[in-house]
Image: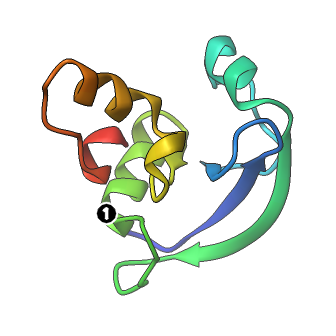
Amino acid sequence: MQERIVYVYKSLKRDKAYLYLKEKDVFSHIPSALLDAFGAPHFVLMFALHEKRNLPKVDPIALDRALDQKGYFLRIDIDDEENNLLNIERKRLGLQPLEEPFLK
């Protein structure tokens, strides 16, 4: 993994949703349905990504891979079960909840 700059945006529409991009303010490669659900992205920070970078709630290798393959990475924190509609539906159906790595 080579060092790269990553740009992070938060959703003003969805609580605890973040979009990581490899280019600042370039949203053309993100599916329109995703952008509609995410809402207008609000820039929050940029950082240097490298192998030894310790990131909270994000695996640096998975982030790097997603940026190479798709140009973006979507993170939705599911700390609050009430905000996680997928797990609420899974619980209603009697299924085990998904953990964070499966939702990325």
The residue sitting at 25% across, 49% down in the picture is: 99
The residue sitting at 79% across, 35% down in the picture is: 13
Q: Residue 74: x percent and y percent?
A: 53, 43
Tag 1 secondary structure: helix
Q: Residue 91: x percent and y percent?
A: 24, 30
| Mark 1 lies on residue | 61
Near-viewer residue (102 or 59): 102
Near-viewer residue (97 or 94): 94
Is residue 102 visible in this depiction of the protein? yes
Q: Is 57 above or below relative to 19?
A: below
**Dividing the image into 4 quarters, which one contains the N terminus?**
bottom left
The residue sitting at 70% across, 31% down in the picture is: 38
Left or right: 54 as drawn, with respect to 7: left
Q: Is 54 above or below relative to 23?
A: below
Q: Quadrant of residue 96?
A: top left
- Dot 1 amino acid type: Ile
Near-viewer residue (62 or 4): 62
Q: Is 27 above or below relative to 17?
A: above
Q: Is 38 above or below relative to 25?
A: above
Is residue 21 visible in this depiction of the protein? no
